[in-house]
């Protein structure tokens, strides 16, 4: 069974849990680690012949054009993580529109290919920000991967459809590609990647992933470049945020390699109905 693997390409200092206006002002003076870390991912994928979807932040793309070109030239799908990594919950519809429009233009200008997919910072399409979906349709996006059908303190929409499906909006249809959850005794356990991929022992994670697979659902998984960088500078923040961000970083390289051996992965676009996944 073919599954999808994706990466949200952002700097280690852009993570929402540590975000604040003061830190944002220093983005330009921080040490950039995103290109080197993404190259580590590209190398792991290349060794297994796997193509992935890369949701690249517009801010990062503008500063690392060669990386964006490398992603496209090596056959991966280029998609959008927005421009400035503001949570949608902190944006007005107009600011959101400008953010996703700017990101799409930056990425398409550098990559030379239509960008069809979008993923919000911290999966921030939740109850109350569904207005983002018709805006995405109007701005030319064909699919979204921002609605996490689980319960979490900072994201998630419990009860949301966990399968790939088409959502009708006032501006037309958009395909929703939810990150994977595993139904375990009625609980929707996130198994899509990120913190849970680092928290659970790999053998347990693999069992949950096999369970999703046995239910006939393709896996939609995600990781970040900074998750493969155990040497990144440590940031100040709450104990919980620090725990979530720095837990088991040294294990991710091995686990991702193992995951690539145990399951078959491709880009998200490969899982979508053909007529909906190609640019008009
Ligand atoms: Zn992000």
Image (spheres, rainbow, N blue to C red):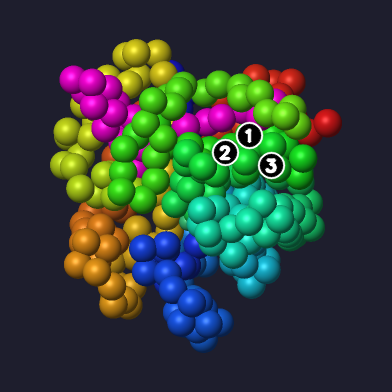
Relative to 145, 246 lies left or right? left
Quadrant of residue 175 within the rendered picture: top right
Which residue does the numbered mark 3 point to in the structure image? 136
Give the secondary structure at mark 1. Answer: strand
Along the viewing direction, whichever of 231 and 273 lies nearer the viewer: 273
Quadrant of residue 106 within the rendered picture: bottom right
Crowdedness near tag 3: few (<14), some (14–19) or many (≥20) residues, C-alpha within 10 Å: many
Furthest residue toward top: 215
The correct choice, above or below, for 195 with respect to 14 in the image is above
Q: Which mark is residue 143?
A: 1
Distance, label 2 to label 3, CA atoms, is 11 Å
Q: Residue at x 28, y 66 (%)?
A: 230
In magenta stretch: residue 124 = no
Q: Residue at x 34, y 13 (%)?
A: 215
Frontmost of labels 1 and 2 is 2
Asked if the beta carbon under badge 3 is closer than 8 A to the nearest atom of ligand 1, the reply is no
Image location of residue 12, percent across then percent down: 41, 68
Image location of residue 212, percent across then percent down: 32, 21
Frontmost of labels 1 and 3 is 3
Give the secondary structure at mark 3. Answer: helix
Furthest residue toward right: 280
The correct choice, above or below, for 158 with respect to 251 in the image is above
Furthest residue toward bottom: 29
Q: Residue at x 69, y 42 (%)?
A: 136
Which residue does the numbered mark 2 point to in the structure image? 130
Distance, label 1 to label 2, CA atoms, is 14 Å
Relative to 162, 193 lies left or right? left
Dot 1 or dot 2, earlier in sequence? 2
* Residue segment shown in magenta: 173-193
């Amino acid at each position: 069974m073919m599954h999808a693997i994706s990466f949200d390409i952002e700097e280690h200092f852009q993570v929402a849990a540590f975000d604040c206006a003061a830190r944002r002002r220093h983005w330009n003076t921080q040490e950039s680690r995103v290109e080197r870390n993404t190259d580590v991912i590209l190398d792991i994928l290349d060794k297994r012949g796997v193509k992935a979807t890369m949701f690249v932040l517009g801010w990062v793309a503008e500063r690392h054009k060669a990386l964006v070109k490398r992603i496209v030239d090596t056959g991966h799908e280029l998609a959008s993580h927005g421009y400035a990594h503001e949570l949608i919950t902190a944006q007005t519809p107009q600011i959101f529109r400008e953010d996703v429009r700017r990101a799409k233009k930056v990425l398409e200008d550098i990559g030379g290919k239509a960008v069809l997919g979008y993923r919000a910072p911290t999966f921030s399409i939740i109850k109350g920000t569904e207005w983002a979906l018709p805006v995405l349709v109007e701005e030319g996006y064909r699919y979204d991967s921002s609605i996490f059908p689980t319960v979490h303190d900072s994201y998630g929409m419990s009860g949301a459809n966990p399968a790939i499906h088409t959502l009708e909006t006032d501006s037309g249809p958009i395909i929703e590609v939810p990150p994977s959850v595993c139904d375990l005794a009625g609980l929707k356990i996130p198994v899509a990647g990120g913190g849970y991929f680092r928290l659970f022992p790999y053998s347990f994670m693999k069992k949950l992933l096999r369970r999703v697979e046995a239910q006939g659902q393709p896996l939609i998984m995600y990781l970040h470049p900074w998750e493969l960088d155990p040497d990144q500078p440590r940031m100040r923040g709450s104990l919980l945020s620090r725990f979530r961000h720095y837990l088991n970083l040294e294990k991710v390289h091995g686990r991702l390699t193992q995951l690539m051996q145990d399951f078959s992965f491709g880009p998200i676009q490969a899982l979508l109905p053909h007529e909906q996944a190609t640019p008009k």
